[in-house]
Image (cartoon, rainbow, N blue to C red):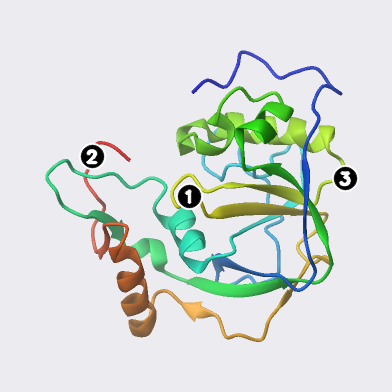
Amino acid sequence: MARGARLPEKGTANARKVVRRAGEVFYRVHSRRRRAHHFNPEPQDHHFGGGRFDSTPNDSYAYLYAAPKPETAIIERFVRTLRFDGQGNHRVLPLKELEGRLLSQVRLTRDVELVSLCSIVHLNAVLQSDWWLVESAPTEYAFTRRWGHWLRGEADWADGFVWRSRLDGPNESLVLFGAAAENDLLAETGEPPRALDDEDGLRWLAETLEDYRVEIGTVDPAPGIGS
């Protein structure tokens, strides 16, 4: 998959719109210091770290990643850099990655309009020739963020993007955009958040990750092959 040598000209995308209705429920992983429905208002570095469609100083906005299924939210957050060792062992998720993390349920408080990146036709509509924008590895995130900023300008009506999860397809992932950490898009559902770093949470997480051949360890995983 290739990202292209440069961004397209302004006004050349024909983004496809999908609507998610008020009341729909999603799951997200977040820090214990942030409420379930609060967005992350902190821009990321231009080149390093961060997520696929985070804001940067070039395009500053609050953002929140979520998924219709709790498993997808978990996999997208914790498994994206894990590799198999080529010896038949499970991938290893270091325990420290779970410290202070919660899995929470949120609901839409109003209808939201999203740019769909869920099919190759929808990707072609925003001048992507393949699945790179939504399936590239974290090493490409500096570029996917820049493309995301361009696409936000092309679809200034959009409350976010939705795409087929790279690691849990065909299930969907989405990102919502806001002007600040608190906005009118989401509310808590009243369902208590699940702590991912206590005994009950670790037990549930271990059972959930088993199907994905991931186990919870206490040390950093060794470099492996595949993905």
Q: CA distance from mark 3 to mark 1?
A: 27 Å
Which residue in the protein does label 3 denote?
157
* Label 2 crowd (10 A; few <14 / some 14-19 / many >=20): few
Residue 115 place in picture, x, y as percent: 75, 43
Say the numbered circle drawn on residue 142.
Answer: none
N-term mark: 3 or 1: 3
Q: What residue is shown at x 80% (from left), y 52% (from top)?
A: 159
Residue 132 place in picture, x, y as percent: 54, 30
Q: Nearer the viewer, residue 104 or 43?
A: 104
N-term mark: 2 or 1: 1
Q: CA distance from mark 2 to mark 3?
A: 42 Å
Residue 61 left/right relative to 42? right
Q: Amino acid at mark 1?
A: Gly
Instruction: Work out whether 207 lies above or below 63.
Output: below
Instruction: Mark 2 and mark 3 in contact? Answer it, CB < 8 Å.
Output: no
Which residue in the protein does label 2 denote?
224
How many discs mark residues in the rendered view?
3
Residue 208 place in picture, x, y as percent: 36, 69
Q: Nearer the viewer, residue 44 or 191?
A: 191
- Between tags 2 and 1, which lies in front? 1
Q: Nearer the viewer, residue 92 or 32?
A: 92
- Between tags 2 and 3, which lies in front? 3
Q: What residue is shown at x 77% (from left), y 44% (from top)?
A: 60
Q: Quadrant of residue 219?
A: bottom left
* Label 3 crowd (10 A; few <14 / some 14-19 / many >=20): few
* Label 1 crowd (10 A; few <14 / some 14-19 / many >=20): few
Most extreme residue toward the top, as rendered? Answer: 5
Q: Amino acid at mark 3?
A: Trp
Which residue in the protein does label 1 denote?
169
Most extreme residue toward the left, as rendered? Answer: 87
